[in-house]
Amino acid sequence: MLGVCYYPEHWPESWWARDAAEMAALGIRYVRIGEFAWSRIEPESGHFEWEWLDRAIETLGAAGLKVVLGTPTATPPKWLIDLYPEILPHAENGAARGFGSRRHYTFSSAVWYRESARIVTAMAERYGESPHVAGWQTDNEYGCHDTVLSWGPEDLTAFKGWLRRRYQTPEALNEAWGNVFWSMELASFDEVELPVRTVTETAPAARLDYWRFASEQVVRYNEMQVGILRRLSPGRFITHNYMGFFHDFDHHAVSETLDFASWDSYPLGFLEKFPFSEQERTRFTRTSHPDVPTFHHDLYRGMAGNRFWVMEQQPGPVNWAPWNAVPAPGMVRLWAWEAFAHGAEVVSYFRWRQAPFGQEQMHAGLNRPDRVRSPGGEEAAQVGAELKAFGALPENRPSPVALVFDYEASWITRIQPQGKDYRHEEICFRWYEAVRRLGLDVDIVRPGADLSGYSLVLLPSLPHVGEAMLETLKTTEAVILIGPRAGSKTRNYAFPDNLAPGPLAELIPIKVIEVASMRPALHAVGGEVSGHAARWREWLETDLPALASFEDGGAAVVATDRVIYCATWAEGDLLSEILTTIALPKAGLVPVDIPDTIRIRRRGDLTFAFNYGTEAWTIPDAAAKRFLLGGATIAPQDLACWEG
């Protein structure tokens, strides 16, 4: 099904009915509203003006549309900030980040927590049992604009309380943080300072705890909103819309109380924000890299109940990237169908009509500001017609490959990257890309998730291996491919007693005795597999034979019967050889021979293929296939779907 984001407060009320009718005619079923409307709902403290929102919801419902109502906590109104300035977040330099945009709050403010509960309660009491309200979105894009970590007085007070509960005594805190180093020992929790604004680097264990604390503040805040909505709006779903390549809090933990996760898909914007090479950015300027949207589909599908929505889908150029291209013709349609192929229940476009004012006026919508449908809107209409004719999509099936993705690993490697270009999100993405280029489907799972049923498990970046993660790896029958820096840290950001890979030494008999980050260059490795390494290298102590070695003879890849360890950052050629020569044969998986701009995805008994390239691609054995979309030859920026 399709959805759209709509802002009735931005448009004359005389437009609403026509807008709603056109949405329904286009094939839209769900409409998200309200997430930025606090100042119109409560223009002054305690004075609510619900009537306009009543009429907006009624107008949408009368057209047969279902409303997803956003809680408006992403935009505290000016009067609230004036009453309670302690709500504001603080930058690393200690300055308050002021009113005038959005997300101007810290999760640590007790006053903010109270005021958020108050407005969510008021909305749920008003609309919780409305027949037109199908579900709720909590807040909007938690952490956007670097707002997970705040560095003000409210944050310090809350952090001290968190540490007291966690460690109980200052002695335990000193031990965990290694405070004997540089004479940093504390006599009481009252002496704790924020791990910022020091002469040089603060204790890495303290910074990791601060990130854990900040992430748990987001979890606690979301749980508060969910609890209110569950009580006052029974039978409605609750979701939150996450962002792409944003790892500042644990999305898995936040999602535990949601019915499903949603995310906001802006493939062209993410192409510019992610550390792709200039060659890749140029190649995919108007399509995005083929794995940018799908990585996130597979990530968020694994958050809560094997379900997800795309709450905001890019329909045209955005306004926030360094360069903002217009999608190539066909891509708005392709992105929608690709989301459905990966299991999306709803693809909701942002937004219905481009705003002619405000910070996002350069951000396209399904309609232009003059009420004429945009090119992206025309493609959305095509998707709506195709969905109507297509019928129900089958249920998702587990993929043969699981990739373990850990948010804490991102924090650990950002705190002490040891190499300027060592990026957790990049190594995880490149491993995902390598498998998808071989035509295989991937499930992305959290550490400790059940791994039964998978043939191959990927651990591209997992510095801390907890007990639950170790147990699932010990019990799974899958082949396991492990990347560098695995098991290199304890929970308290120290070396494990047995050195890296720490607990994983129970699975593969190796010890990492030295590491180096490498300046930008490619280093050849060869042996049973060959290719290039970069960025990171480890020296191993092991009796296992090297399957690939550096020029000085040091092992780059070693393996047991079912566990493979890569002691370097494998570039694409080396990673592909490790997969096709070692990992996939051990796992009993067969790659699919496809061009590097083609991606395949299976959903139930259907197979989808998507063409991100500039040349048409003819599907092998097409004559034996029954096509439901497209045909034997897929044009650039087009797709096909067949049974089997």
Image (spheres, grey):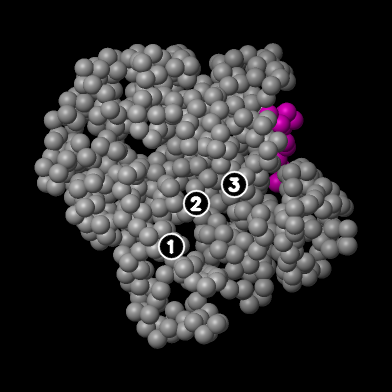
Q: Which residue is mark 3?
A: 402
Give the CA distance from mark 3 to mark 1.
41 Å
Is 542 or 68 nearer to us in this picture? 68
Residue extent of the magenta highlight: 585-597
What is the three-letter code of the residue carrying label 3?
Ala
Above or below, 144 relative to 84? above
**Identity of the residue drawn at 55% across and 24% down:** 327
What is the three-letter code of the residue carrying label 2?
His
Q: Residues within 10 Å of mark 2 (few under 14, many from 20)?
A: many
Q: Give the quarter of the image for residue 366.
A: top left
**Identity of the residue drawn at 63% across and 77% down:** 497
Q: Regarding mark 1 in the picture, which secondary structure is present there?
A: loop
State the mark number for residue 247. 2
As drawn, is 475 to the left or to the right of 516?
left
For the question of whether residue 302 can be seen, the reply is yes
Above or below, 605 relative to 630? below
Q: Give the quarter of the image for residue 216.
A: bottom left
Predominant secondary structure, magenta span: loop
